[in-house]
Image (cartoon, rainbow, N blue to C red):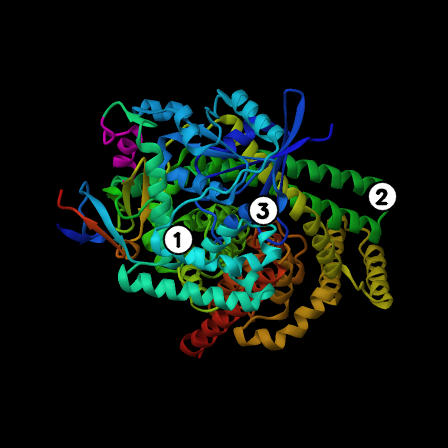
Amino acid sequence: MAIINLRKMAINQSGTIVAVKVGGELGRRIREMGLVPGTEITIKQRAPLNDPVALRVMGGTLTLRNNEADYIEVDVSS
Amino acid sequence: MEPVLTIALAGNPNAGKTTLFNHLTGARQHVGNYPGITVEQKEGYCLHQGKEARVVDLPGTYSLTAYSVEELVARDFLINERPDVVVDVVDSSNLERNLYLSCQFLELGVPLVIALNMIDVAEKRGVTINAEKLSARLGVPVVPIIARSGKGVEAMLDAVLEVASAGIRPQPAFLSYGTDLDQALTDMTPDIAACADLTAIYPQRWLGVKLLENDEQIVSKIMETYPEAGKRLSARCETIGQHLQHTLGVYPEAVIADHRYGYIKSIIHQGVVTRKFVADRLYASDKIDKVVTHRVLGPLIMAGVLYCLYTFTFSYSSVPVEWLTDFFALVSKGVDMLLPDGPFKSLIISGVIDGVGGVFGFVPIIMFMFFGIAVLEDSGYLARVAFMMDRIFHFFGLHGSSVMPFIISGGIAGGCAVPGVMAARTLRSPKERMATLLTVPFMNCGAKLPVLTLLIGAFFSDHQARYMFLATLAAWLIALCVAKILRLTVLKGASTPFVMELPPYRFPTLKGLLIHTWERTWQYMKKAGTVILGISILIWAMMTYPQLPDNRAAHYGSLRQETQRTMAADEAGLAEALVKIKTEEAQEKLRNSFAGRIGVALERVSRWAGIDWRTNIALIGGFAAKEVIVSTLGTAYSLGEVDPEETISLQERLNKDPNWNPVVALAVLAFIMFYSPCFVTVVCIAKESGSWKWAAFSMLFNTLFAFVLAVAIYQIGALLYLR
């Protein structure tokens, strides 16, 4: 299994979330948007200054700042 | 007819809740605010099968926690007002994520109807949803609809009436949250059951789940009313929290969320959702985004769009603004002819008509701006702007969405802070929004421009363009830096997460745009209008009273008679002499008024920045509207009425005045750019922030800040150049 940080993922790379290691408001926001273990994500785009990042989750597109993506670990082996 | 039932519309932002609301209620709606906070409260009425229903549009949320005001408002409404039916508007093309909120409604046990909105979009993407199967598994009616066209809405209302007439409050859904948490919930049952006041309004198990989620509102409610049980409960929550942290390295909230998603997956997987083709094909939105948020093209397109919005707001609105100005000038003229000279006439013309004109003068600008923003917002582009600009604005403690208010306020020189402050509504993060509200007035609005032009023209006429450009740059720099300072001090706190949806691009509907524009404009007229009129009369009184003492008035009277007698032969000379007397009288009147006295008294302080009493009075007048500075300066320098567009005489006068020099001009320029916003803006800040405290802060802080800056410029400048 190759588990990397969401920040390190390349554009168009896909993977499955294995862990979201944050609580509080940020953790809640991340989870309520569907970013929970087992969810498949694909990196879609980065903003012109490389931050934030846009990703495809289930049927929608979400944005995250890089320092928020740091809490999310993704399995990119498949 | 009395409404027989209350329907609450709930759902995720961007799920089409507002479109459905507009479709149901049409023009029969009104917008207010929930008491004390700035969350909009929309209500309307709709008729179905001869029955009238009250429809309440709840704020769009993803969840029902206590983290944001929107979610608390939605939750408290559901619990305290007990609507007869809750219509959960769900985006069919994004079913799984949207059901996360539905799941929480089920846990809360509210009478629910699920509206599968945008079923057509889902089908275009190759997703078919079996509504009957979904309904059977969730145990609530599920109706596919297309809110934009109204398709399916009748059937949805049938279902709503059926649920309402059944009249049974459903049992809260029983979800399993895993062995550890289920055990904890069982352990907590006796203590929760003891809190009888709370279990009367909240389901028992739901209270337990909220305690495990460490929900602020519920925890504090239990602690207040049942401290004994509360202590035991929080101890239990703590042990389970530590246990989960040790064994799995996760928070209880995370486990609960995982199980909710697990429940949703188990429901939709077997035969509810079928995909006809591969889900990962490029949707139209993605194709557009490849260009629109492109590294190089994206910012260029954005600059173009923002420039268009700006031109649209300020250029096209100028025609109706002129009509209004002409209209109010006409009314003034009429009153001038009808009423005899005296204080009453002055009150009507300078106080009331100018005040009302001031309120309405902004209406076209605000209307055009809200229309432009509604187009960007409804089409989904605004979220992309926030996405692209966030890196820069986040650095200064703001949010990507702050860019719009800054541009409107004068980020491109010549905007207006009033619509700018109102544009900050698109920000959903409270701290960032407040910092934006407080710093946008630093931008160079259209009313400051004639004043800047006057001073730059008088003292730096060789480099006019360069100084104007520097002024714009300085405004941006100072505004952003002050925002950072505010976010590190009075508005301290972690930045709101940028976990945000980029909604698919959509064509906005004209009906939606018009309703959006109208309701926001109306709110400005209703809420700000009355206060602005009052303050405008107050400022008029300050600049007019007290009037000259009798002996001085008599002095000017006799002076006039004297001149008329001695110069009777020379007609041109007489007219000139009379004008001179009139302007001198006006100057003395102004100096004698409250504003004048304050200006003179303040000279002792303002000297530090090289500013004399005449400029002080003008700056006080500038609180009414910045362009008033020019005309007041004209009166203070006995030049009579000065047209802000035609200031050559005033420029020459200032240039020759011994009290003025380039260093003073620079200090005054800085002061004018950054001191207290005009009172219309201040009123809007109060209304938008929901508190006069922030409006007062904005006046005092900005004035103090501008003064320190002006003193620094004057003192350093004097040291270097004025030897």
The answer to whether dots 2 and 3 both sit on one chain is yes
Residue type at tag 1: Asp
Please state, as top left, top right, bottom left or bottom right, where the N terminus of chain B lies in the image.
top right
Left-right relation of B585 to B196: right
Towards the viewer: B607 or B55: B55
Residue wearing tag 1: B182
Residue wearing tag 2: B339
Pointer 2 and pointer 3: residues touching (CB < 8 Å)?
no
> Tag 3 or tag 1, which sits nearer the N-term?
3
Residue B287 among magenta residues: yes
Q: How many marks?
A: 3
The answer to which quarter of the image holds residue B146 is: top left
Residue type at tag 2: Leu
The answer to which quarter of the image holds residue B289 is: top left
Residue wearing tag 3: B79
The percent coordinates of residue B168 (x first, y second) are 59, 35
Range drawn in magenta: B278-293
> Tag 3 or tag 2, which sits nearer the N-term?
3
Q: Is label 1 in a helix, a strand or a loop?
A: helix
Q: Whole-Å distance between the Cαs marked 1 and 3?
A: 24 Å
Towards the viewer: B528 or B191: B191
Q: Whole-Å distance between the Cαs marked 2 and 3?
A: 59 Å
Residue B357 appears in the rendering: yes
Residue type at tag 3: Ile
Q: Is label 2 in a helix, a strand or a loop?
A: loop
Left-right relation of B78 to B715: right
The mark closer to the camera, 2 or 1, is 1
Which residue is rendered at x = 58% and y = 53% of the image? Answer: B199
Q: Is residue B548 above or below residue B627?
A: below
Please state, as top left, top right, bottom left or bottom right, where the C terminus of chain B lies in the image.
bottom left
Towards the viewer: A35 or B175: B175
Report the chain holding disc 1: B
